Image (cartoon, helix red, strand yellow):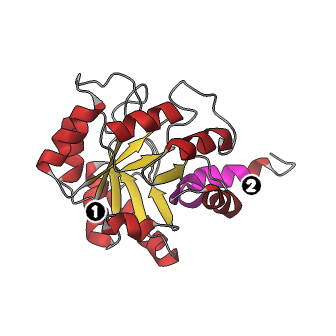
Amino acid sequence: MSGVTEAIRGRLVVSCQAYPGEPMLDPRTMSQVAQSAVIGGAAAIRAKGLEDLRAIRTAVDVPIIGLVKVGKDGVYITPTLADCVAVAETGCEVVALDGTRRPRPDGLSLAETVAGLKERFPEVLVMADCGSAGDAVAAQEAGADLIGTTLVGYSGERPKTDGPDWAAIDEMLAVADRPLIVEGRLHTPADAAEAMRRGAWSVVVGTAITHPATITRWFAEALPGS
């Protein structure tokens, strides 16, 4: 088991991501958000975008799970081998990529992508963002080091639930022979604790911690004047 994997075992990973058109979409801002998350107890940071990753790398000394997003549909999380290499070059300990069984834009298989990355960066871990138990099994066979539930409800295999899709999570836990990281619609500390109770290795929380627009909307819509 790698040092990074042990460092996040039973602990919280915080996703620090802003979206196009938002005021917080700035590398300095994201690095400050990441620093704040580490002060609060984050064992690692998950972040997107090469500039953000470089800025965060200089700001924190915890492991970083890095990715890029190319487009918004289909396979868009670190979709190609070239994208994986670019993310690894920023100094991330873990590269997160689409771990579904869908065709990849560069025509490579997931196994070829993982092998190509590890040939260049043997020390870097691969986190496969999966949408189902079937994806998890395929990602393990392809050589992924970590399995994420990130794409449950987003890959077309399952409907998107309001909160965590516990049924899918349980199915993935049942087949996982690698550390399974629960990510996606964990809105409360109780959700995070429940994921750990069910057997998760770690949890990733983003929106509920680092996305002020969404958090504000939750409160605003709960009030009668909204």
Q: Is residue 99 visible?
A: no
- Quarter of the image for residue 4 reads bottom left
Instruction: Write down the residue under mark 2.
Output: 219
Labelled disc at residue 179: none
Q: Say which label, 2 or 1, has the lower sequence index.
A: 1
Task: Judge whether 137 appears above or below 147 on screen.
Answer: above
Label 1: which secondary element: helix
Q: Residue at x 21, y 52 (%)?
A: 88
Q: Residue at x 67, y 39 (%)?
A: 167
What's the distance in space between the residues labelled 2 and 1, CA to CA? Answer: 31 Å
- Other-residue count near label 2 (Cα within 10 Å), few / some / many at <14 / 14–19 / ≥20: few
Q: Residue at x 33, y 34 (%)?
A: 70
Q: Is residue 216 left or right of residue 22?
A: right
Label 2 amino acid?
Answer: Phe
Q: Quadrant of the C terminus?
A: top right
In the image, the segment drawn in magenta is 202-218
The foreground one among 131 and 145 is: 145
Q: Residue at x 48, y 46 (%)?
A: 176
Q: Is residue 98 left or right of residue 212?
A: left
Q: Position of residue 47 (x, y in %)?
A: 38, 54
Instruction: Write down the residue under mark 1.
Output: 55
210 in the magenta segment:
yes
- Other-residue count near label 1 (Cα within 10 Å), few / some / many at <14 / 14–19 / ≥20: some
Task: Judge whether 72 appears above or below 193 on screen.
Answer: above
Label 1 amino acid?
Answer: Ala
Q: Quadrant of the N terminus?
A: bottom left
Q: Position of residue 52 (x, y in %)?
A: 31, 55
